[in-house]
Image (cartoon, helix red, strand yellow):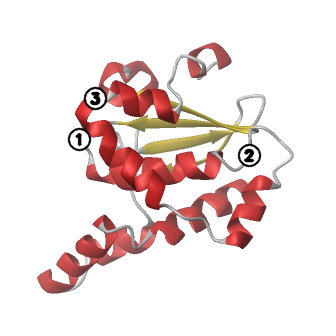
């Protein structure tokens, strides 16, 4: 069970990107390119309740590079949305509490209320990308992957996170 004390041991986005050294620039560049549509920004900014957001990540993971900055951008819209990022491989005790089908999948993003009761989870990549990579021709899969790595699915990530927090 994640405690407030353990949650506090994670990094905020700035400290996490600094800890990554040379890889940190990829996360920062993605964060700077990330835009949140006005209606989504208003939703996140309007949250009155605290939300503690646990993120398990690694700097070498393309899914983390694409999605952790989006989570950080969302959290930047409201001080009640607190992010704590843990490097997965250095924090297997935390990771092993939130396995996906028995696997240590990253990024794993777990949302908790102010009392650290789990609200929901967002895992790895948006559903549209998962579907696109699971079906279709090799050419179609390559197009989905290319678009994903260029940030073209960021609105899907934002929408899925919004759906989790709207419950």
Give the label on residue 60, or none. 1
Give the label on residue 133, or none. none
Residue drawn 44% across the image and 43% down it: 108
Left or right relative to 136: residue 65: right
Q: Relative to 153, does residue 34 appear above or below in the rendering?
A: above
Report the Cα–Cα distance between label 3 and label 2. Answer: 27 Å
User: Within the image, what quadrant is residue 17 found in?
Assistant: top left
Give the label on residue 21, or none. 3
Q: Secondary structure at mark 1?
A: loop
Q: Work out whether residue 36 or residue 81 is closer to the camera in this orientation and state it.
A: 36
Q: Relative to 30, does residue 163 appear above or below in the rendering?
A: below
Report the Cα–Cα distance between label 1 and label 2. Answer: 28 Å
Give the label on residue 78, or none. 2
Q: Secondary structure at mark 3?
A: helix
Work out which quarter of the rendered image holds the C terminus and state it: bottom right
Residue drawn 81% across the image and 51% down it: 47
User: Within the image, what quadrant is residue 72 found in?
Assistant: top right
């Amino acid at each position: 069970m994640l405690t407030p004390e353990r949650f506090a041991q994670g990094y905020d986005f700035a400290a996490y990107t600094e800890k990554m050294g040379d890889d940190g620039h990829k996360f920062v560049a993605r964060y700077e390119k990330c835009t949140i549509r006005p209606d989504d920004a208003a939703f996140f900014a309007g949250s009155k309740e605290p939300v503690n957001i646990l993120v398990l990540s690694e700097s070498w993971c393309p899914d983390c590079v694409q999605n952790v900055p989006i989570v950080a951008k969302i959290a930047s819209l409201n001080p009640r949305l607190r992010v704590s990022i843990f490097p997965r491989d250095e924090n297997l005790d935390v990771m092993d509490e939130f396995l996906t089908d028995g696997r240590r999948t990253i990024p794993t993003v777990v949302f908790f209320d102010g009392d650290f009761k789990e609200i929901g989870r967002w895992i790895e990549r948006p559903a549209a990308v998962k579907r696109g990579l699971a079906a279709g021709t090799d050419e179609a899969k390559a197009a989905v992957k290319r678009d994903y790595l260029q940030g073209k699915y960021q609105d899907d990530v934002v929408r899925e996170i919004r759906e989790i927090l709207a419950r």
